[in-house]
Amino acid sequence: MTPADHGGKRPNAGRKPLFDEPSRQVRVPLSQVETVVSFLSAYRDETTRATDPRGLLSDPPPIPLTAYLSAVPAGFPSPAADYSESLDLNTHLIIQGHAESTFILRASGHSMIGAGIFDGDELVVDRALTPKEGSVVVAAVNGDLTIKRLTFRQGQPVLQAENPHFADRTFAEGEELSIWGVVTRVLHRV
Amino acid sequence: MKPSRIALVDVNNCYVSCERLMRPDLERVPMVVLSNNDGCCVARSAEVKALGVKMGTPWFHMKDLAKQHGIRAMSSNYALYGDMSRRFHAVLAQWVPPECQEIYSIDECFLDFAGQDRLDLTETGQAIRAQVKQWVGLPVSVGIGSTKTLAKFANHVGKKQPQWNGVCDLTVLSIPDRLALMDQFPVQETWGVGRRLAEQLIDLGIRTVGDLARCNPKRMRERFGVVMERTVAELQGVSCVEWQTQPPAKQQIVASRSFGGPLYTLDQIAEPVRFHMGRAAEKLRQQGGVAGRVGVLLETNRFRPQDPQYSPSRSISLPAASDDTAVLTTWAVTLLRALFKAGYRYVKAGVMLDDLRPKEMSQGSLFDSLPPERDHRRETLMAVLDRANGKWGRGTMGVGSAGVRDQKGWAMNRGMLSPCYTTNWEELRAVS
């Protein structure tokens, strides 16, 4: 007789499930592996976050309304009439004096999700700024426009994605990198 | 008094450069931008110029060459070029006071550096080049001279001779050096000297810009008139061309365009004529004018010698000047009926408004009821028309069949149009 504690399943052994649901294998074109893997990792983060217990508010908190108790005499000019200020998004999003050098481009893909730049977001790009170590830039590489973070390693420029599934782009002798502009803002639709 | 110093800043291959800003992959690709309807080259990249393709070459004449050299053609994207031009001129506005900037065309700008005597203009020119290249991504050349004609010539030199690195300042050259430089360029490179005039000059032995600059302006006036006298004086450093900071009100408004394909009947051609008159009348109202004269033109295809050719135009004085689309259209269609002959393959129609004057000064006709009262209901109607077309796009509302914005046989062909990257949220440049 073999002891009852031999064989069978060992607790916590084997490959951990990646998702909280059954999964299966699929074929992915090589060129799309990075995109699919990064999508899945984002999906996993989201689903694990979503399973965190989160209490539902059955009663929304009351929002106090301010009541003004001063009557405005008819025919008397409003004291606020001299204040016609408002918020102007143009002056807020565009560096003063840089209207001519500021362009709006659209992000595509998942390579910069770590910088808060998602597929379909609008990017405010200023060509008048000088790119620095750590700037998020639009760069022209072999005729393509790409958005990445610019860093330097041993004095050599490197374009870094903000997504662990994308490799850094380094530049060999004779390769061309030109900076198209510096990204200053992201407009993300929620 | 110090001699004035004028710079002409000009975008190299403007339309091609605008397209390339958003398409770095086209940077070294030989390419042309075609006119409305994808007809002729209106801009050529340096590679295409090097192949000897002339400005205005019809695209179908160069299809073989294009195949052989991989020349890429694009339709005119005026929304993009207009926005880039606005940015270009706005960057240049940082360099001089407002009254010293003259916007000469979509891609050319005069800057007057009078009063900034201590500036080294070669250095300044290089700084301008660098700034425009960085800020708006357009390559420019800068020419500096003591008159506009000299600045224009200097700009040409800076563009053609690589040793200048895009900036040529004639004001630092001695007179003999300047003349020697002018002798390296044929006389038709002078501003205002066209091909025909150049032929006459060459007959007189005036072959180079330098030859022309050595002429006696008074003598040249006797032979060629006052315009030539001014050109010669300008080449000698005597300023004769006025500075214009405000674009003058137009003396003539022309709206014409080639059809997408040939048209044969009066009814077919009346549609684009009504449409063009709608546009012309709108421009007229924008400048607050009325037109005393209406004209119409028709064209057959001069690039098809096998076709019978008939390209007439005629204009007529109106009994009372008007800015009313309906009135002007009625006259245009009347003229069209008089001009039109069946049996031709028409490829283009247009309308002209002449004898323009400010609306306040317009006189009624002798036979109108006196005093010539303005019809305020018509004015309101025209204002509604302009607002509707401004809000929902050209051709939303118009007279008769001009106001139907369907795809028509006469609508423009723009088969190789790039997106409106800088003016339409739906067409922004994507970056991954």
Image (cartoon, coloured by chain):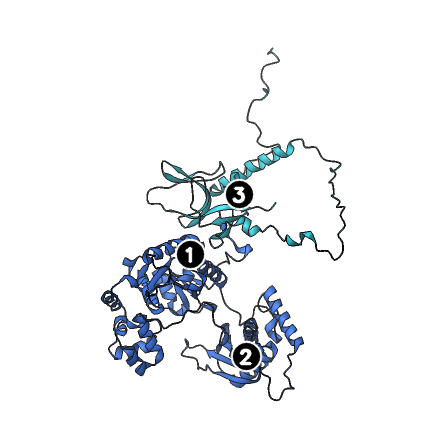
Chain colours: A cyan, B blue
- Dividing the picture into quadrants, the one containing residue B10 is bottom left
Residue furthest to the bottom: B367
- Dividing the picture into quadrants, the one containing residue B373 is bottom right
Q: Are marks 2 and 3 on the same chain?
A: no
For the residue pair B237 and A150, the one nearer the viewer reads as: B237
Which mark is nearer the camera, 2 or 3? Answer: 2
Residue A111 screen position, x and y as percent: 49, 41
| Residue A70 left/right relative to B4 | right
Which mark is nearer the camera, 2 or 1? Answer: 2
Question: Quarter of the image containing the N terminus of chain B?
Answer: bottom left
Badge 3, how many Cα within 10 Å: few under 14, some, many 20+? many
Badge 3: chain ID: A
Secondary element at image label 3: loop
Observer able to see residue A123: yes
Residue B352 screen position, x and y as percent: 51, 78
Residue A72 screen position, x and y as percent: 75, 52
For the residue pair B317 and B409, the one nearer the viewer reads as: B317
Secondary element at image label 1: helix
Mark 1 sits on what residue? B20
Q: CA distance from mark 2 to mark 3?
A: 55 Å
| Residue B364 left/right relative to A99 | right
Residue B115 screen position, x and y as percent: 38, 61
- The amino acid at mark 3 is Ile
Mark 2 sits on what residue? B291
- The residue sitting at 41% across, 62% down in the picture is B14
